[in-house]
Amino acid sequence: MAIRTKPAHRGGARRAWTGALAAAALVSTALTGPAVASPAASDASAASAASVASVASAASAASAASGGHHATQRQLDAAVRDGVPGTLARVTDHDGVWNGAAGVADRTTGRERLPRDRYRVASLTKTFVATVLLQLEAEGRLGLDDTVESWLPGVVRGNGHDGRTVTVRQLLNHTSGIFNYNSDPEFRRKVAGDGFPTHRYDTWQPEQLTALAMSHPPYFAPGAGFHYSNTNYILAGMIVERVTGRPYGTEIERRILSPLELRATSAPGTDVRMPRPSGRAYSKLLSQDPAAEIHDVTELNPTLAGASGSMISDSADLQRFYRALLRGELLPAEQLGAMMDTVDLGAGVPAGYGYGLGLLRQELPCGVEIWGHSGDTRGSLSAVAMTRDGSHSIAFNFNADWTGDTGKVVEAEFCG
């Protein structure tokens, strides 16, 4: 599919698989602010330095015992030195499973991060939602080239938006041009800035989030470019409910989580709590001041992200899901092919990057091609990356949203 592209927003580029993916994907999950330099850990992190060193040492020893993931462990350690309270990674390859960690899960107690810790996976939710829609397409219940208007009459209207000209496919690959509701300044202040303490428990209906997007003009005409927009997946979730009569989370549960026995994964609805085991999540609430206060943002109402990024999981479940997806266990060949048919991410992004239907592709500098997704929400940076055959994969999480280079972790694992 040939499309004209426009540059994507560039803030926080250090946090995705690479700067290119951040430009087009991570930042537009838009519950974080620009990345800032953090030359040292916070006072509390410094106080737990002994614990950090202990965890890193243990992880390095595990690396040696399992065939060697020394470069990956060094990047987990580096993220903690840059200010991330705690990092966690799980790798599967021909040598088996390796678990790495550094820092702490809880800055107050000093509790270490554990392999089975659950965390908010943010935009990795998009791959689950896209999979459900593609299953429905395989069942003949909708078409990828159906218009949004045909399923959600009158919802995509205003300021140049017109659902009669936007297709389901364009929602899933972010070529719709629909404005990203997360970029609305007042919404951003409430859910990610100084308004977070007051609004962290607010419930947001998908209709509210869509209306926020409609109050702004589109980025371009449908199909005329690429711009990552969470509104696309809010609408995708609404279409799942319109087609099936059930919420997107229920369909994810019955179609993916139950068949694959992903017991650590959930679409939490309005539940503000994190299931156990889990650590804490930390944020500076959009501040670019390296000395800014670090806030515990673990509890929040996930409806602020809904079908664009509300899910919770752990590393083992995420690897199982993406491996099953890429190996054709969840979709027929035709639908999987459509999912992996990628478009360019935009002007200024190097070759080798693409976005399919809820699925990211990247060719690393060493020539390895990886597939997966990344996610960024309050106090949590997550990513899954794996080879096309699923034989080598990594899933990892940082429990902070203002610092840390996830791209270096991925490159360390696949390129050494």
Image (cartoon, helix red, strand yellow):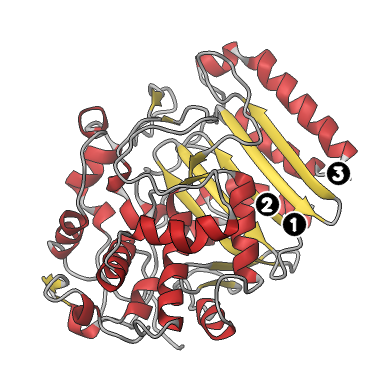
Q: Nearer the viewer, residue 118 or 180?
A: 118
Q: Is residue 36 depicted above or below 387 in this figure?
A: above
Q: Is residue 413 depicted above or below 43 in this figure?
A: below
| Residue at image mark 1 | 414
Going 33% across and 78% down the picture, which residue do you hit? Answer: 168
Amino acid carrying label 2: it is Ile
| Residue at image mark 3 | 68
Amino acid carrying label 1: it is Phe
Q: Quadrant of residue 164?
A: bottom left
The residue carrying pointer 3 sits among few (fewer than 14), some (14 to 19) or many (20 or more) residues within 10 Å by Cα, namely some
Going 56% across and 60% down the picture, which residue do you hit? Answer: 259
Going 73% across and 27% down the picture, which residue do you hit? Answer: 56
The residue carrying pointer 1 sits among few (fewer than 14), some (14 to 19) or many (20 or more) residues within 10 Å by Cα, namely many
- Percent coordinates x, y for residue 93 in the rendering: 79, 55
| Residue at image mark 2 | 394
Q: Nearer the viewer, residue 4 or 380?
A: 380
Question: Disc 2 vs disc 1: Cβ atoms closer than 8 Å?
Answer: yes
- Percent coordinates x, y for residue 204 in the rendering: 21, 47
Question: Does residue 415 appear to the left or right of 251 in the view shown?
Answer: right
Q: Is residue 23 visible?
A: yes
